[in-house]
Amino acid sequence: MSETEASVPRRRATVRPAPPGTAPPSIAWLVAWTAVGVVAGLGIVVGLGAVEAAGGQDVFLGVTAAVPATAVGVAAVCYLAAAATGRRWMGWAVLPVASALPALQYAGVPRWASFGVVGLGLLAYGLARHRPATGTQAAAMVGYYGVAVAATALPPRVGLVVAALALGAHVAWDVVHYRRDVVVPRSLTVFCLGLDVTAAALCVAFAVAA
């Protein structure tokens, strides 16, 4: 080895340390996002119930199984969009679009079909881009949304309860993603948790009280 080579320090291959973990959210932060989710849950039940009632659904003040099923579909699409693109913020970005999908029913497209087509499109995109979380989120959508949609074919009271329970069960999915801090922003998981619990509880209450 020459003196020049000896005088130049060798660069050793190093592994960059993982970025420090995100600090746990404050209580105020959790309460704020939960409150936003609760308000959204109230809005979904009252708003979609009014739409269903205007369409001739006079049972349970228009709150049928289609109401919680729609909420499940919106949540599932948001999670799947974030997974398929590999961009956590896409969960929030897609929320307005997913919420507008039910409007396609006025063009003759059933709600389940609009959510299904979007879900398949996101699945295909995510798999083509080799996004590892895509398959898991797609399977979750089939499970949660599939049960909720199937509930719409049941007798009204039973269907409403089953679809509401499917929405309530989605809380577990929210909690898992909040604790692991993966796929979607934590703010979205907390928002969804408040929405899921509120909407599901109201739908069960409508079914029991009616």
Image: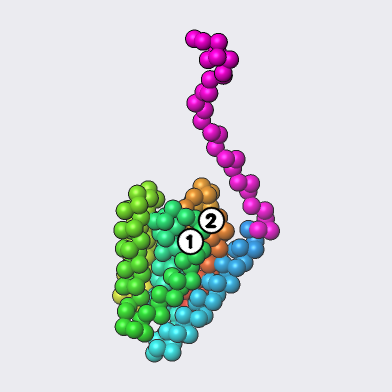
Between 157 and 37, the one nearer to me in the picture: 37
Between 151 and 30, the one nearer to me in the picture: 30
Q: On screen, 5 above or below 147?
A: above
Q: Secondary structure at mark 1?
A: helix
- Name the N-terminal-most of marks 2 and 1: 1
On the picture, is 41 further left or further right than 24? left
Residue at label 1?
A: 91
Between 140 and 125, the one nearer to me in the picture: 125
- Percent x, y for residue 96? 49, 71
Q: On screen, 37 above or below 47?
A: above
Which disc number belongs to residue 155? none
Name the amino acid type tagged 1. Gly
- Percent x, y for residue 19? 57, 40
Q: Are marks 2 and 1 in contact (CB under 8 Å)?
A: yes
Which disc number belongs to residue 185? 2
Instruction: Give the number of callouts.
Output: 2
Name the amino acid type tagged 2. Pro
At a point 45% along the width and 57% down the height, the residue shown is 82
Within-10-Å neighbours for mark 2: few <14, some 14–19, many 20+: some
- Percent x, y for residue 117? 31, 68
Q: Secondary structure at mark 2?
A: loop
On the picture, is 39 further left or further right than 173? right
Indicate whether residue 13 is drawn in magenta. yes
On the picture, is 18 further left or further right than 136? right
Q: CA distance from mark 2 to mark 1?
A: 8 Å
What's the magenta region?
1-29
Between 196 and 28, the one nearer to me in the picture: 28
Within-10-Å neighbours for mark 1: few <14, some 14–19, many 20+: many
Camera sees residue 131: yes
- Percent x, y for residue 150? 32, 70
At a point 34% along the width and 58% down the height, the residue shown is 125
